[in-house]
Image (tube, grey):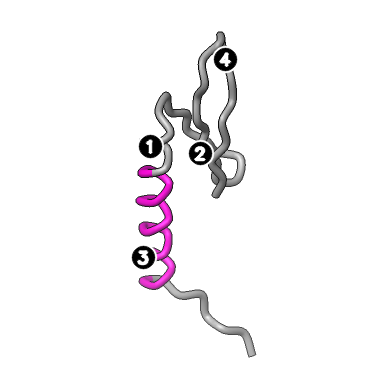
Amino acid sequence: MRIEPFEKSGRIYWRVRLGHRSLTFQEELAARAFAAQLHLRMGWLKARNPVPEKD
C-alpha cells in the first residue's frame, strides 16, 4: 500500500494505492486514515482466512 501526493490544477491531492487500484483524497489526513483502516482490515481478513501451508 502506498500514499503518494500529486498535483492537479494547482492543488495537491493524495492517492492511496493498493496494486492497480487507487483512491484519491483532497486531504492527507483522510488518505492516511483510510490507509490505516484498510491495513487493519486486510490483516483481519488474512488472520481469519490463513493460507494453508504446502508440504
Q: CA distance from mark 1 to mark 4?
A: 18 Å
Identify the residue under disc 4: 8
Label 4 environment density (alpha carbons within 10 Å; few <14, some 14–19, many ≥20): few
The structure residue drawn at horizontal position 57% and vertical position 84%, both measured from the top left corner, is: 53
Please tell me whether mark 4 sits on a helix, a strand or a loop: strand
Identify the residue under disc 3: 44
Label 3 environment density (alpha carbons within 10 Å; few <14, some 14–19, many ≥20): few
Residue 40 x %, y %: 37, 59
Q: Quick check: 16 above or below 12?
A: below
Identify the residue under disc 1: 29
The structure residue drawn at horizontal position 53% and vertical position 41%, both measured from the top left corner, is: 3
Q: CA distance from mark 2 to mark 3?
A: 19 Å
| Quadrant hosting residue 31 | top left
Q: Which mark is residue 16?
A: 2
Q: CA distance from mark 3 to mark 4?
A: 35 Å
Of 49 and 17, the residue lying toward us: 17
Q: Residue furthest bottom?
A: 55
Query: Which is in the foreground here, disc 2 or disc 3?
Result: 2
Q: Which residues are magenta?
A: 33-48
| Quadrant hosting residue 6 | top right
Q: CA distance from mark 2 to mark 4?
A: 16 Å
Q: CA distance from mark 1 to mark 2?
A: 12 Å
Q: Amino acid at mark 3?
A: Trp
Residue 5 x %, y %: 56, 31
Q: Main secondary structure of the magenta part?
A: helix
Left or right placement of residue 34 versus residue 17 in this view: left
Query: Which is in the foreground here, disc 1 or disc 3?
Result: 1
Please tell me whether mark 2 sits on a helix, a strand or a loop: strand
